[in-house]
Amino acid sequence: TLPVAFFLGPCALESRAHALEMSAAIREIADRLGVHVVYKTSFDKANRTSIGSYRGIGLKEALPIFAEVRETSGLPVLTDVHLPEQCALVAEAADILQIPAFLCRQTDLLVAAAETGRPVKVKKGQFLAPWDMRNVVDKLAAAGARDILVTERGASFGYNTLVTDFRGIAALAATGAPVVFDATHSVQQPGGRGAASGGERAHVPALARAAAAVGVAAVFMETHEAPDRAPSDGPNMVPLDRLEAVMRQIIAVDATAKALPPVSL
Amino acid sequence: TLPVAFFLGPCALESRAHALEMSAAIREIADRLGVHVVYKTSFDKANRTSIGSYRGIGLKEALPIFAEVRETSGLPVLTDVHLPEQCALVAEAADILQIPAFLCRQTDLLVAAAETGRPVKVKKGQFLAPWDMRNVVDKLAAAGARDILVTERGASFGYNTLVTDFRGIAALAATGAPVVFDATHSVQQPGGRGAASGGERAHVPALARAAAAVGVAAVFMETHEAPDRAPSDGPNMVPLDRLEAVMRQIIAVDATAKALPPVSL
Amino acid sequence: TLPVAFFLGPCALESRAHALEMSAAIREIADRLGVHVVYKTSFDKANRTSIGSYRGIGLKEALPIFAEVRETSGLPVLTDVHLPEQCALVAEAADILQIPAFLCRQTDLLVAAAETGRPVKVKKGQFLAPWDMRNVVDKLAAAGARDILVTERGASFGYNTLVTDFRGIAALAATGAPVVFDATHSVQQPGGRGAASGGERAHVPALARAAAAVGVAAVFMETHEAPDRAPSDGPNMVPLDRLEAVMRQIIAVDATAKALPPVSL
Amino acid sequence: TLPVAFFLGPCALESRAHALEMSAAIREIADRLGVHVVYKTSFDKANRTSIGSYRGIGLKEALPIFAEVRETSGLPVLTDVHLPEQCALVAEAADILQIPAFLCRQTDLLVAAAETGRPVKVKKGQFLAPWDMRNVVDKLAAAGARDILVTERGASFGYNTLVTDFRGIAALAATGAPVVFDATHSVQQPGGRGAASGGERAHVPALARAAAAVGVAAVFMETHEAPDRAPSDGPNMVPLDRLEAVMRQIIAVDATAKALPPVSL
């Protein structure tokens, strides 16, 4: 079993300058900690709570920035796709395609992503039982995807709240795909602020440690140098200046957990 | 307040012959009961549980059938859209565009549907609080939609189960849009059969009567002459030969409820 | 099937004078509407959110008041029991013993209540699946209870919120016991005010109509002449001056629903 | 912060011989691992799913056995109380009184337990938000309890299932009471086998590691030499011959987590 890897980056691609700064800063942390990091960024926030919300800079503007981030930082780049026709374009500039949770059952999108030949990381819908991700993985595999990653990011629990069921990690792992824990979206409060989602960033370190103790391939965290000024998902992002400290906790627990002799009941 | 209307039809457009038979049968029932009915049909099941599941006959084949159903039965036709580029095409042949629950926050799809000028019926996501449908309605309205309908179809409740929270009808009505209760998808058991969704058709009449007692503009029910042989959603569809009896119950409760002097606490 | 009956009264037995006034007022309404009513009152609130909350006047003071209410109003009296040793005493002065929801699995309490020979009304725990009430009913029957009533009062749905799953009425009815819908506790928000429970009284009429449309033997509602001054459960009680209007709605829907030819799918 | 302690023992006190064997075996493990262990046992299962289920040997028979276990094993003894009058008796022979989850809001029981002067360990109800345990702790403290422990054991999540929300540990810790994670009841499936509860023992090690990574004072696990023959809670108990291996995992993660420099976001 490999040590924990990380998917890190701001929620949105805000500008070329911001992307270059963030990816450089994250690369530095990755080097210091000796961990494998993928840079996460989104060219479009296609399902914002409200129509007045920031959408992103768009695909055409984003593609050269992806390429530049990749080159300057040396980090692989992951980004979301929302429509089948975006997949081939995105695959030219990004290394991993991510399927958003709401869209995890949209067959055309899964197939288009799989057909690019790129690795596909798919988030478990908030409405989906963990064991039902097997059908999602099967859809991707049937369409030719070879590298598939599955992501836990919380399940609907009453209104405007998600809960992370850590029993689900075992069901996700049973698909055969590496399991990623999305520690920042798991503490989202969908719609919890009326025209925006809330979040409880304070719980990110504890949930990420829990995931590492259970056993995951990677942890995903969104980060921003000033989350409270970020155009989206601010309430749940990790401030950039705390990111390394949180990662150190995850790395320590991961190392301990992966060294344990297994026990099965 | 108008008497309750109905959205009725099979889950999938199985064939031209099937569509013509079903719509004729439903038209007869509508005439006998003197109620307003919209014919519901789907050209594509874009988010089936499993990749091996039946998808539908596709948009191109479906469009002339929509037109024929409309002409021969005299019923308006409603169908789902899954991608922005489908909206304009669908709007030529169908009367009402329906946004699936998983897609209720996909801004591009909402905008494309709104821009057709057709009425848009949007289902509340299983992951969404009822009051958060205001943001969805606002997105549609901002994109120019004039006739917007919102639909209750159950909320995630643990795994593989939905629950209908009838308190939510008031929150949906507060958006100003007429509220439709989807009585057959509300008893779905998503993913409950491994590679397919289950359902509890037996609860449809009681939940539909409850919705009528609370107060809704319309009830949506999928129906099939042989649900257990239907290519999708069989476990929750109403057998065609019971449909009229269920509708009579709904109509009776609706008439009683809408005649009541209001009371507010 | 009999027309809907009612369980009505304030949450707490506040004083002899208050009990006599409330029961007289409720008796008048019952006569005007021609319905069967049981007077509900509690001598002790044994599970208040906080230790500083009002507990009630206690069992010894309450027993003669129960008797007086019964005599002067002519209404049967129902009250909660919390401990096995209370049952025999309560059975002398009250007509029906009620088992609170949190205690619905406490075998000793169920047995003691059953052994009084009085009818026992038991509330479904917020943590219990509807079908698991069969075990509760079996416990009571095994201990000799002949008249058993089961009550729906909402299920846990995330935090500080309950949801009423109207599919559950069928499972409750399958126990063979008459089903009561508790319309005011179903809109409780447990712990929702920090040191007290909140509530959404506004939803009571709609949920009670829904229950009548589904089909229940009785509706339970707490009422108070000034809920916002009541010592407990104010946020979900029905103001006494609206009670009759709410009951009229329930009676109308009940009459319609019970006259419908049955349909089973 | 102290290293993780353990509450260990079979669900039920089956017999004097069984209690002496189990407590001796557990004491050996405790010595080998150098950890603080409390022996858990129940003289009565007061809220079994079904009336035909095993109840236990009863309080009078149990008290001398508690004393003998304490003497021979040297382990402190914890047991459940269900009724106020049991508290003083139990306090003579047991070291810690435990309030079951269903009863966590029963004021009289909390007060009687507090008044014994013994430490009181109270389980969070499956229906309770974590932050509402503050009211429970306040009730105990107001009645004079000095040593109060709070326990996470899962929250209702749909029907017949519990979910552990690890965000709740922080809310529990905010009461000031040490937090215990009950790893075996958290994987219970209440009522999941019709006339008995089911359970998913396989998830115990992962959830217990997660709790240790989040940070708890102690882990509670029920254990049995042959869970599938145990009179209660078999499906979720840890086989005695795997107990030490599970504990070693917890101890390792706990040591790592408690050595981490804190980070707050």
Image (spheres, coloured by chain):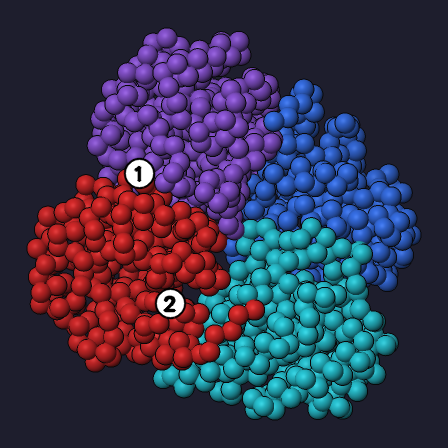
Chain colours: A purple, B red, C cyan, D blue
Q: Quick one: D246 or B38, which is closer to the camera?
A: B38
Question: What residue does disc 2 label?
Answer: B216
Residue C95 placement (x, y as % from top left) = 72, 84
Question: What residue does disc 1 label?
Answer: A138
Q: Is residue C149 above or below residue D173?
A: below
Front position among marks 1 and 2: 2
Callout 1–callout 2 Cβ contact below 8 Å = no
Say left or right for B183 vs A89: right
Mark 2 chain:
B
Q: Residue at x 79, y 87 (%)?
A: C68
Q: Quick one: A144 or A99, which is closer to the camera?
A: A99
Q: Is residue C128 above or below residue D165?
A: below
Q: Quadrant of the C terminus of chain A?
A: top right
Mark 1 chain:
A
Say left or right for A29 vs C65: left
Tell me the tag on residue C193: none
Q: Amino acid at mark 2?
A: Val
Give the class, few, some or many, for how many residues have Cα within 10 Å of label 2's Cα (few <14, many ≥20).
Answer: many
Say left or right for A107 vs C12: left
Residue C163 placement (x, y as % from top left) = 53, 60
Q: Amino acid at mark 1?
A: Asp
Q: Quick one: C167 or B167, which is closer to the camera?
A: B167
Say left or right for A246 vs B155: right
Residue B7 placement (x, y as % from top left) = 26, 65
